[in-house]
Amino acid sequence: VQLQASGGGLVQAGGSLRLSCKVSGTNFKINTFDWYRQAPGEQRELVASISSGGDENYADFVKGRFTISRDNVYRMGYLQMNSLTPEDTAVYYCHLRSRGMDFWGQGTQVTVSS
């Protein structure tokens, strides 16, 4: 199983970014798909999840600003991030669990300037 994240970058506060994650090597449509993030000196934290059935869940700190989505045909996961703040600065990781194992993308840096 491989996950390849992309789409990070530098953006001003109030701006938007869209992260993408290409998934291969698994029957993606049956997996719950997640985005996590890790800021310097902090633990990795769950940002958003989307189930195989399309049910979405968000951390309180991104509700109303971020939207997770998936395309099972092209095996892609996305995270649309709006109204970004400097507190959103982190490395963002896509993740899924398959056959009892955790698989992670390589991480993409998001930096929000004030």
Image: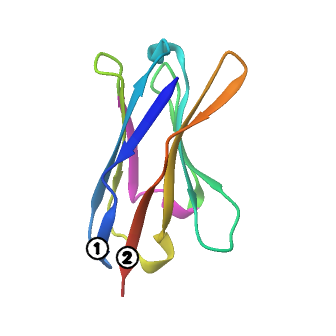
Q: Is residue 63 above or below residue 50?
A: below
Residue shown at 50% from the left, 61% from the top: 91
- Callout 2 amino acid: Val
Q: Quadrant of residue 65?
A: bottom left
Q: Horizontally, is 40 left or right of 22 in the view?
A: right
Q: Is residue 45 above or below residue 51?
A: below
Query: Mark 1 — residue?
Result: 11
Q: Is residue 86 above or below residue 6?
A: below
Residue 28 locus on image (x, y percent)? 46, 18
Q: Horizontally, is 38 left or right of 15 in the view?
A: right
Residue shown at 44% from the left, 79% from the top: 86
Residue stretch in magenta? 61-70
Mark 2 falls on what kind of element?
Answer: strand
Q: Horizontally, is 22 left or right of 35 in the view?
A: left
Residue 85 locus on image (x, y percent)? 41, 76
Query: Mark 2 — residue?
Result: 112
Q: Horizontally, is 86 left or right of 103 in the view?
A: left
Residue shown at 48% from the left, 28% from the top: 2
- Callout 1 amino acid: Val
The verdict on residue 109 being magenta is no
Pointers 2 and 1 in contact (C-beta within 8 Å): yes
Q: Quadrant of residue 113?
A: bottom left
Which class describes the residues within 10 Å of circle 1: few (<14), some (14-19), or many (20+)? some
